[in-house]
């Protein structure tokens, strides 16, 4: 199975978003984490199905939540660069590449 590695800031984004959603409604944070997990599963199965958005960076949209998982496919290794809210500062993650 393809290994997935999170940039430390991407990991923090997931935790912060899940905490925010959980604070809004019970179990909503868990549903967010499940949505991210589903996206990661799709990435592992076939990362090239996700469109390129910048040089070698691809984006997988989560279902239900307005988030994108930005990643690089390193041939057997997936690097998660950001888990970004789609309606916020779009290019903030570029310094991580």
Image: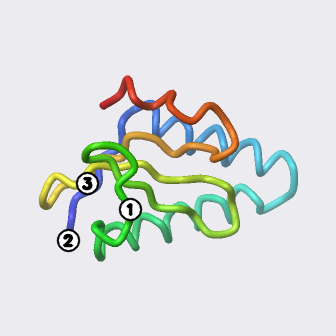
The image quadrant where one finds the C terminus is top left
The image quadrant where one finds the N terminus is bottom left
Circle 1: is it few (<14), some (14-19), or many (20+) Cα within 10 Å? few
The answer to whether residue 66 is left or right of residue 59 is: right
> Quick one: SS at disc 2?
loop
Q: Position of residue 36 (x, y in %)?
A: 53, 61
Q: Which mark lies nearer to you, 3 or 2?
A: 3
Residue nearest the observer in this picture, 58 or 83: 58
Q: Which mark lies nearer to you, 1 or 2?
A: 1
On the image, which quarter does residue 93 sit in?
top left
The numbered dot on residue 1 is 2
Give the mark, 3 or 2, whose residue is nearer the N terminus: 2
Q: Are marks 3 and 1 in contact (CB under 8 Å)?
A: no
Q: Position of residue 82 (x, y in %)?
A: 45, 41
Q: What residue would you read off at disc 1? A: 51
> Quick one: SS at disc 1?
loop
- Picture residue at 56% right of the left edge, 45% below the top: 14
Q: What residue would you read off at disc 3? A: 78
Here the colouring is rainbow
Give the mark, 3 or 1, whose residue is nearer the N terminus: 1
Q: Is residue 73 above or below residue 81?
A: below
Give the mark, 1 or 2, whose residue is nearer the N terminus: 2
């Amino acid at each position: 199975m393809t290994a997935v590695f999170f940039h430390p800031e991407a990991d923090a984004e997931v935790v912060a978003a899940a905490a925010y959603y959980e604070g809004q409604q019970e179990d909503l944070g868990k549903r967010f984490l499940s949505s991210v997990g589903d996206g990661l599963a799709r990435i592992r199965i076939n990362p090239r199905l996700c469109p390129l958005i910048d040089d070698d960076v691809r984006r997988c949209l989560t279902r239900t939540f307005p988030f994108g998982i930005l990643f690089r496919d390193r041939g057997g290794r997936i690097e998660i660069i950001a888990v970004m809210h789609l309606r916020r500062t779009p290019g903030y993650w570029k310094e991580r590449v």
